[in-house]
Image (spheres, rainbow, N blue to C red):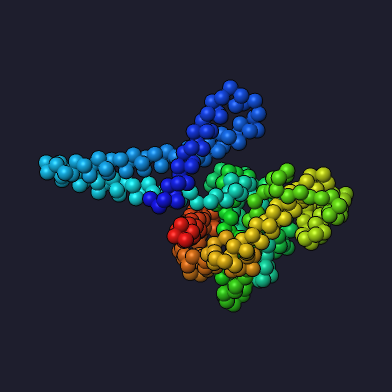
Amino acid sequence: MKQSIAAKLAQLSRRLEELNQLLSSETATADLDNYRKLTREHAEIAPVVELYQAYRSGEDDVRTAQEMAGDPAMRDFAESEILETRERLGKIEAELQTRLLPRDPNDERNIFVEVRAGTGGDESALFAGELFRMYARFAERNGWQVELISQSPAEIGGYKEIIVKIVGRGAYSRLKFESGGHRVQRVPVTETQGRIHTSACTVAVMPEADEIADVVLNPSELRIDTFRASGAGGQHVNKTDSAIRVTHLPTGIVVECQDDRSQHKNKARALSVLAARIKDKQIREQQAKTAATRKSLVGSGDRSERIRTYNFPQGRVTDHRINLTLYKIAQIMDGDLDDLTGALAAEHQAEQLAQLGEEVAA
């Protein structure tokens, strides 16, 4: 094991001892917020330290077997033990390296998912509706809750834009690489000559902002307008000015919400989406700085980047960032995204490990 990694693991072991003492003290629960913070840290560190202890125990076993190998009668047994233990140590070391990778602090957060129709007119709006259903089905498969925030239905079906909130532990970690351009190739229902058309939608996945710590919305920097909500085709949803438009003056970000009859609820929803968009903008700016020094295959956060193509005639879905093609388009459109999200997460992890190796070597 590399010396720098061993030193970090030893530091974590000492910290776990400190946490055990703090949590077992009589005053541990006096400050509940601090107690929860300590228990979360303990839950994160304990499995890593346990693995490290297993690694050190394995190293002791190798040394014992090496001493036994000096006895001719025990040599074959000792050499077998050494090989087996070193193989086990290799697996433990690989897992330890993975666990030591920097964690995305947003991974466990709820998310806002925005799907917008792009080039392709009616066909793009229909595809936006299918992408929304795909993510909703994926959320359902994971036991997550989907809350409609805002929608702009298209006349032929689907959506010009739809925003939903997905509530569930680890939602951002599973879907954060979905942001970008999604392209569809197929014969539209409106096509009379059987020609394949290409249309596109954009998807934005944003972690929910912490109302207190993450984004501070200064009322003087907000312009809030009310207007009468209307549905597809212009028909009135209600006769009161319950719809809300919030403009963040420093960034120019605009959020509209009109799906609830309550102006108060629409305003609260719009502000939560605005905070998420501001936080997302900060994340993407930081990612752009990182990408300037190191090319990131996934998670670049570039909304204009074409990340995936859904080819219906061939039944395939291709993710262009990792050159992955799957011939299971029906299952994917029904929310079976595990192969895609898993491959993207694995690629990101491999890149982090490569970067960690470079930093250790330096």
Q: Position of residue 258 (x, y in %)?
A: 79, 52
Looking at the image, residue 236 sits to the left or right of residue 318; the answer is right
> Which residue is found at the position 51% from the left and 37% from the top?
15
Q: Position of residue 252 (x, y in %)?
A: 79, 61
Examine the image and state in which quarter residue 255 appears: bottom right
Give the camera-side residue of 325 and 106: 106
> Which residue is found at the position 61% from the left and 49% from the top?
106
Q: Position of residue 332 (x, y in %)?
A: 51, 58
Given the current orientation, which residue lies at the most extreme top position?
A: 26
In this orientation, does residue 359 appear? yes
Give the camera-side residue of 246 and 118: 246
> Which residue is found at the position 61% from the left and 24% from the top?
27
Give the camera-side residue of 174 and 66: 66
In this orientation, does residue 238 appear? no
Q: How many marks?
A: 0
Q: Is residue 39 above or below residue 230?
A: above
Q: Is residue 193 above or below residue 274?
A: below
Q: Position of residue 2 (x, y in %)?
A: 40, 52
> Which residue is found at the position 54% from the left and 67% from the top?
295
